[in-house]
Image (spheres, helix red, strand yellow):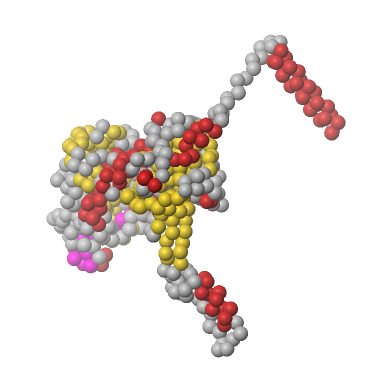
Amino acid sequence: MLTQLSTHAMRQSLAVAAIALMIGAGTAPGLVPMAHAQGPDSVADLAEGLLDAVVNISTSQTVKGTEGEGTVPMPELPEGSPFQDFFDDFFKDRQGGDGGGDRKVQSLGSGFIIDAEQGIVITNNHVIADADEIEINFADGGKLKAELVGKDTKTDIAVLKVDPSLRTLKAVKFGDSNVMRIGDWVMAIGNPFGLGGTVTLGIVSARNRDIQSGPYDDFIQTDAAINRGNSGGPLFNMDGEVIGINTAIISPSGGSIGIGFSIPSQLAVSVIDQLRQYGETRRGWLGVRIQPVTEDIAESLGMTSTRGALVAGVIKGGPVDNGVIQPGDVITTFDGKAVKDMRDLPRVVAESPVGKAVDVIIIRKGVEQTVKVTLGRLEDGEKLAEAETTAPSDQGPIATATVLGMTIGELNDEARTKFSIGKEISGVVITEVAAGSAAAERGIQAGEVITEIAQESVSSPRQVMDRINALKEQGRKNALLMLASKTGELRFVTIRMD
């Protein structure tokens, strides 16, 4: 068997070699040489022209520690122990040299210069967060102290400034991340593991990645090697333009496994401009709480597809507290930009100027309409959202009922006390949820309050029963409920009625 296999393999090899010779000679009928895709030519010239604009960033921070907080407690030794001096010296060193627990913590990252005349350097916020001192290290060994101009925790961007009169600086410019396609070549330059300027090459592996790191996640994914210390460094296109800021990796080991993420320039530029101008961000704010439009919710609302963002609540005192947008509305277009899913809306709103009047297309009770909204400021709105309460409404008659696996009752003083429900909340209280029921599958719990069914307010168990029966008569398979928690936070859920 071994001899037969060897002979067969030899014949195959000879046949392949013969075909290759015929192809080279152009004599093999019906066979066409395959064109092999080529990678980019050497990027040495490109890298050489960019390295001086990429910097290493080192920070230091004084951390105060006490016993039990990052320090090893000094063991109690018998009086006169010969090991006393040894332990005194050892624990003094471990606690920062003075026995008080204070110690210097240093970290390294990357950054890049975007304005040589003003000395503006861009990096990640997490690279410089809580730093006492920030130092910029250049490729030629030079160093400059840097000061913080502004930072944004939501996008993890920080703007630094150095004195441009102390040395000649070289800057790079931003490109358009929107034109980048999956498969386009990109180059990362940074400071991995503190080694200094390092160049890696790869492609755009994916776009619009949501890695749950913030409200505006829209990352470029790349397989260009990004490691610890690359954070804050630039991701270049093949024209030498910055189309991303390297900020995160997925790695069980801490090293690159070919899955890195960059903040797209389209998102970063507007944030950087605001930080340079104001020292802080000034984002647009709509003043609504939203949730995804699932297939069940779309069916309950009479929509033919799952698109847009469902308004689960309106912030009291916000820009749309005047009723122009209401809970249950589905926002499908904002200022001419399509809202394909829920996470599109916060990003396009935040990118809009404060005070701008915009057209918003909504679907309300199955009917599409356009409303005009003047945006507030997100940073001001966050304070209102924390203190938000739901407006009260009239109470319904006393009654109890069981429906869709829930026992429901009047929201009276006894129920409010039992479930700690605020007086500003109105509707029908859920007193019990049957195990294994459709309501239990949706995570509904006793103590929650039904405020609406199919976008119509309910104030008594009888109204709940009537609305459910009406939906069944219409042939609906799911009921859309708006629920309020005991603190007034609203959410929509759908429950099967079959």
Residue at the spot 18% in from the left edge and 45% down from the top edge = 320
Residue 128, quarter of the rendered image? bottom left
Residue 302 seen in this snapshot: no
In the image, 59 versus 292, the foreground residue is 59
Residue 242, quarter of the rendered image? top left
Relative to residue 80, is residue 353 drawn left or right? left
Residue sitting at the far front: 166
Residue 279 seen in this snapshot: yes
Give the answer, above or below, for where 431 lies relative to 379: below
Magenta region: 405-417
**Number of callouts:** 0
Q: Position of residue 206 (x, y in %)?
A: 46, 36
Q: Position of residue 100 (x, y in %)?
A: 44, 74
Residue at the spot 28% in from the left edge and 49% down from the top edge = 279
Residue at the spot 84% in from the left edge and 33% down from the top edge = 2
Residue at the spot 48% in from the left edge and 70% down from the top edge = 96
Q: Position of residue 409 (x, y in %)?
A: 23, 59
Residue sitting at the far bottom: 79
In the image, 125 versus 277, the foreground residue is 277
Relative to residue 491, is residue 125 drawn left or right? right
Q: Position of residue 432 (x, y in %)?
A: 31, 60
In the image, 467 versus 57, the foreground residue is 57
Q: Is residue 282 magenta?
A: no
Residue sitting at the far right: 3
Name the quarter where the N terminus is drawn.
Answer: top right
Give the answer, above or below, for where 140 lies relative to 239: below
Name the quarter where the C terminus is drawn.
Answer: top left
